[in-house]
Image (cartoon, rainbow, N blue to C red):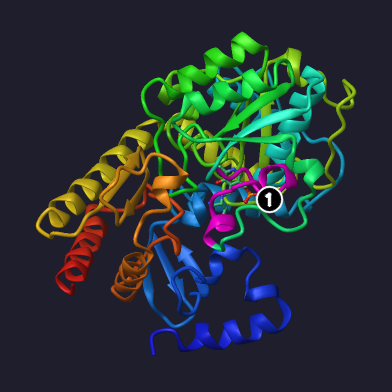
Amino acid sequence: MRYQRSSTLFQSAQNVIPGGVNSPVRAFKAVGGTPVFVEKAKGAYLYDEDGNTLIDYISSWGPMILGHAFEPVIEAVKERADKGTSYGMPTELETQIAELVVEMVPNIDKIRMVNSGTEACMSAVRLARGYTQREKIIKFAGCYHGHSDAFLIQAGSGAVTFGAPNSPGVTQGTAKDSLLAQYNDLESVRNHFEQHPEQIAAIIVEPVAGNMGCIPPQAGFMEGLRKMCDAHQTLLIFDEVMTGFRLAKGGAQESLGVTADLMTYGKVLGGGLPVGAFAAREEIMNHLAPEGPVYQAGTLSGNPLAMAAGYAMLTHLNENPQVFSSLENKAKVLEQGMIALLDKKSKPYQINRYGSMMSLHFTDQAVVDFKTAALGNNDHFKTYFHAMLDRGVYLPPSAFESYFLNDALSEKDIDFTLNAFQEYLESF
Ligand code: KE4
């Protein structure tokens, strides 16, 4: 059996880890079957515990933009580890990576490192509330900003995958300050400003949504949010945990040409080690402890191993911006190839793509928000997922996730993927 050892390992894991996984989306609940346990990974390939080689299209949900075990990152971590793994004291390396981010993202004066995207988004919202002295935030149905209480209101990603977009444990007191709007729908945002004048501290948004599948912003959507924030002295928070340092050196801000007030990062920033961050112009960031009154802290924030990995990855991206056009080209070949094959079948489908983020939805309606993303045929998705997995292609195990291409993917890998896709379609 292709997954005998994964199956055995999964049994053991479930005895001591809730659901056998340390993050729900890994459990294959949305697609059925046994989660694949990985032994190691290199470049575009995952090597599972049963000796299967899989072409990886999740890239650790984003971080592995240059492929797995990218040599400069591995070397940097190995070298740094010999100097110790954590001090709880400042290091020059933290300043170096902060200076590099400031160089790569024009509207950042200062950045605070944390340990996950959740922590980055949670802290950014607290800072926005402290800075504006307002309490309410606007988020979008289907967007996911991590598992902090304020965000688990119609959240995307694993929350919606498991039918718990509003998680138990989130109090009414918290929920009342999180106002829900619809992605790509400026009117739904305008209504909140009318009903809550001068009460909205921030809008937090995924500038390219990746937690309902991939949903690019329609023309004028981000620009409209920018205008509304300016008109109401509300801060615009771009959650760039997925898009940061993936869509361009300057992330979605550069790619879309829209400037936010506060940005959150993670994933690529840490080179695969646990890192999140939030950043803004000095006037906002100086409200943060120990400079200002808004408290935020972390034992392992700026951890030297994580900083070494992130610094090596960002340095490579900064010095080799052709990576971004290479990823665009590879994703375009995959998208066009899939469309050509799908158009020969009578099945309804949508393919959404923005740069190296993309997703396939089995529906005849354009997927532009949470409602339309939820119309996808999940039975078809499950069959598609396993058909590709059985042919050696690892896709996100949920229709509410995005693919993340990595630049280690070769033309041969993409041809292999398209052949597997063709075989799947012929099996209908
Ligand atoms: P983390 O706390 O998982 O590092 O980051 C939370 C987060 C914040 N913002 C955005 C836009 C995100 O996509 C995420 C996390 N992404 C998911 C993938 N959809 C992580 C995968 C998982 O939950 O295991």
Amino acid type, mark 1: His
Q: Is residue 354 above or below residue 385?
A: above
Which percent across, then down, holds residue 282? 73, 15
**Residue identifier under label 1:** 147
Disc 1 packing (10 Å; few <14; some 14–19; many ≥20): some
Residue at the image point whose x is 65% and y is 86% from the top: 12
Which percent across, then down, holds residue 152? 66, 48
Q: Is residue 208 above or below residue 77?
A: above
**Residue 361: quadrant of the picture:** bottom left
Residue at the image point whose x is 52% and y is 48% from the top: 63
Query: Can residue 236 be seen here?
Result: no
Nearer-the-camera pick, 252 or 98: 252
Nearer-the-camera pick, 155 or 118: 155
Predominant SS of the magenta segment: loop
54 horizontally vs 32: left or right: left
334 horizontally vs 25: left or right: left
157 horizontally vs 279: left or right: left
Query: Can residue 128 be seen here?
Result: yes
Which percent across, then down, holds residue 176? 74, 38
Magenta-drawn segment: 143-161
**Residue 135: quadrant of the picture:** top right
Residue at the image point whose x is 56% and y is 53% from the top: 74
Residue 46 highlighted magenta (yes or no): no
Count all numbered tags in the image, as a single digit: 1
Mark 1 CB near ligand 1 (8 Å cut): yes
